[in-house]
Image (tube, rainbow, N blue to C red):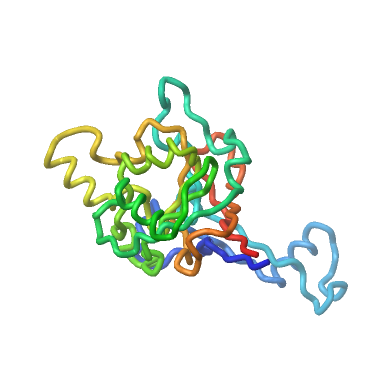
Amino acid sequence: MRIIDLSSAIAPSPEGTPEFLKIGIEYNKHAHGAAQAAALLGVPAHLWRNGEGWATETITRLGTHDSTHVDAPWHYNSSIQGKKTATIDELPLEWFFGDGLKLDMSHKAEGDPVTVEDLRTELMRINCSIKPMDIVLVHTGRDKYYGQSDYMFKGCGVTAEATKWLYDKGVRVMGIDAWGWDMPLNIQAQQAIEKNEPGIFWAAHQADLAYSHMERLMNLGVLPGSGFKVACFPLKVQGASAAPARVVAIMD
């Protein structure tokens, strides 16, 4: 069995990251742990192996969307098809382990979103069909920009129509190796403002569908089109719109 990591590391953000997107981690080394034990329990340092206590870390800031994560329907809207939407801790665990399909859209330019026809063409190329509960991964190659200041503005995105097409085939979890599932925010914003119409900005997110998608995946380029499992269980964050996940592909 071979396991391929499709997740980014949770690491302190580089300088220049917008404040609302920053990840902060405080690292405490072994000497700090020994001092804690001395203060709390009266255990002197010489009673530890090599005089070293426990090493610990404290995440001082981590948004549920700030690393590789799974979005819940609650992220998109408070209600979908007339019903209150589910938060991340309310979704069935069965959604998050299943057969995977990788659809290569790395040829798509920035802001040229994946259409239904693109999906059909790629499925024909890899000689695969979609069955209910498959986990569909859209490979754009934008993971190479992860950690760079313009990462959030890179990507082709997926149309609302293509998202609905996948949903109608029984897909409940889909993912992409870019900052977001929709087109880059700046492109969406420009189009929505110019046309002054709802339904353009965040169209695939707000497609009125109770589905989950993963954003900021990594290493999709090394996967075959099919023949692997995906495990993508999100952290059980109560009432949350998303949660970080350790997403992996499992291959024989």
State the count of labels. Answer: 0
Residue 102 appears in the picture as rendered: yes
159 sits to left or right of 40: left
The residue most toward the right is 47
Return the x and y of residue 233 as percentages of the image width and height: 60, 48
Q: Which quarter of the rendered picture does the N terminus lie within?
A: bottom right
Camera-nearest residue between 209 and 72: 209
194 sits to left or right of 224: left
Above or below, 183 against 106 in this view is above
Return the x and y of residue 82 as percentages of the image width and height: 41, 20
Camera-nearest residue between 29 and 36: 29
Return the x and y of residue 8 as percentages of the image width and height: 50, 63
Residue at 34% x, 54% y is 121
Q: Quadrant of residue 154?
A: bottom left
Residue at 28% x, 58% y is 153
Residue at 21% x, 45% y is 189
36 sits to left or right of 245: right
Return the x and y of residue 152 as percentages of the image width and height: 33, 57
The residue most toward the left is 194
120 sits to left or right of 227: left
Q: Quadrant of residue 124?
A: bottom left
Residue at 60% x, 55% y is 229
Above or below, 196 against 46 in this view is above
Camera-nearest residue between 2 and 148: 2
